[in-house]
Amino acid sequence: MKDDAISKRTGTAPSFWRCIGRELRDGLYEAAFEIAWRAALLAVGTATLMVFWAWASSRRPRLSSY
C-alpha cells in the first residue's frame, strides 16, 4: 500500500524496490547454487578417495599376515 502511494507521487519507488529485491533474490540463488556445487564436488572427491583407499588397502599385504 505504501509503495502504491509512492508510485502515484513519483512513479519510481516501486520499480526501484522491485529491482533491489530481484538483485537480492538472484544473489541468494547464485550463492545457494555455488554452495550446492561445492558440496557436490566435495562429496564426489571424498567418495573417490574412500574407494581408492579401500582398493589400495585391500591390495597391500598386512603385517599380521606374515
Image: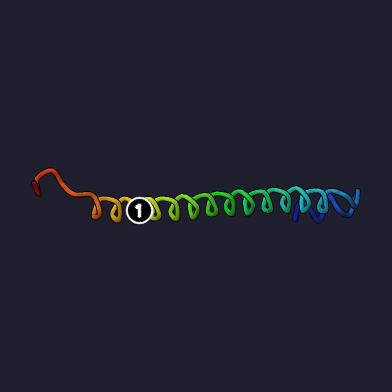
Expressed as whole percent of the image width and height from the top left, the position of residue 42 reads 46, 49
Residue picked out by circle 1: 52
- Graded by Cα atoms within 10 Å as few (under 14), some (14 to 19) or many (20 or more), the crowding at tag 1 reads few
Expressed as whole percent of the image width and height from the top left, the position of residue 52 reads 35, 53
Expressed as whole percent of the image width and height from the top left, the position of residue 62 reads 16, 47
Q: Is residue 27 left or right of residue 38?
A: right
| Residue nearest the viewer, comparing 4 with 21 | 21
Residue drawn at x 31%, y 50% as measured from the top left = 53
Kind of residue at disc 1: Phe
Q: Is residue 53 left or right of residue 7?
A: left
**Residue lying furthest top:** 63
What element does badge 1 sit on?
helix
| Residue nearest the viewer, comparing 11 with 44 | 44
**Residue lying furthest right:** 10
Rendering quarter of residue 58: bottom left
Expressed as whole percent of the image width and height from the top left, the position of residue 57 reads 25, 50
